[in-house]
Image (cartoon, rainbow, N blue to C red):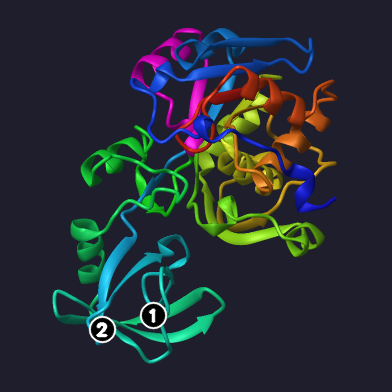
Amino acid sequence: MKPQDYNYHLPQELIAHAPAEPRDSAKLFVYSTKTDEIVMDTFAHISRYIPSKSVLVLNDTQVVPARLELMKLTGGSVRILFLINEWDKQGPIKGLPDRKLSVGDNLFFNHKGLLEVVEQHNEEFTFRLHVSVEEFEKICQAHGQTPLPPYIHSSLNETEARDKYQTIFASKPSSVAAPTASLHFTEQVFQTLASKGIDRTYVTLHVGRGTFSPMTPQNILDKKLHAEPIQVSGESAEKIMNAKKEGRLIISSGTTATRTLESTAEFILKGEGYTGETSLMITPPYDFKIVDAIITNFHLPNTSLIMLVDAFLQSKGAKKNWRDIYERAIKEKMRFYSFGDALLVI
């Protein structure tokens, strides 16, 4: 298994640079692993394809405006994506600058010293704050930019980006990327799901580099990604455990929710909560212990996200593989990546 096994060619015009409006008007590609049937619909109708009494699990993390433009002593500017999700809010903070920095450099915001470079490891830098944690967070909230992925050439202003690149139920701020499979949900969709007896609950994975980084041979060898913080409450664990015992389906919205559920399966199956982190990389073959169906997007080539979808299809004994589905999605001119259309594999 090599990263290039998950490569494919995507016409540039199929990259979504803005979300569907309204959110639930995005296209929905439904694939039944039991019947090998494909249905094309819109996300607003997703309740038609999820069995009643199922439990929908979503990631309630919240994206923070973690990209900040600062000044060097020389007067030059540098934009840094701070890895808020990896930060303990006590010691130094890591970040990814868009241009060259050196250990010892001091960086300024509004002519006030904000932080100092104390360490470098490849493209990742570690910074020591010269202000309090509270002041740094206020600066990011007031002046930071939403970290839209670099392939999105968006005309959204910052106010629009903070709204559109965020799920409607986000409640725990710490992510530097959105759980994009859940961007399509609206209150109307939740109402139609509830009317069918489909329950929902939440888990948390604060999204960082681990979720979206291109795969390396070392990732595949170790079956590990960058560690990301996760949390499953006792209430959610108990709800999921009871559903599994009763034979009701667990529908995971997104690869982040999926990795959280599978990482904590031994706790969930005992009805116990969990707080910690995960570096789980799901590769085929994989025996899914919790997740029965997945809602996801159409992902970038050579990523662990496609590998997870591939592993899920194989675990279900599906006749079609990930490449079959992606080729059909391209033929149907579906929109790809973070602001793109949705895929339900059930």
Asked if residue 161 lies in the magenta stretch, the reply is: no
Q: Is residue 45 shown above or below 69?
A: above
At horizontal 50% and vertical 44% (from top left) the residue drawn is: 233
Residue situated in front as seen by the camera: 90 or 167: 167
- Range shown magenta: 180-202
> Dot 1: what SS?
strand
According to the image, label 2 marks what residue? 130
Q: Residues within 10 Å of mark 1 (few under 14, many from 20)?
A: many
Judge from the rendering whether residue 10 lies leftward or rightward of residue 180; answer left or right.
Answer: right
At horizontal 85% and vertical 41% (from top left) the residue drawn is: 285
Query: Given the image, on which type of amino acid does mark 1 rest?
Result: Phe
Q: Is residue 323 shown above or below 36?
A: below
Residue 97: percent from left, percent from top:
41, 71
Q: Is residue 215 shown above or below 126?
A: above
> Dot 2: what SS?
loop
Q: CA distance from mark 1 to mark 2?
A: 9 Å
Residue situated in front as seen by the camera: 307 or 77: 77
According to the image, label 1 marks what residue? 127
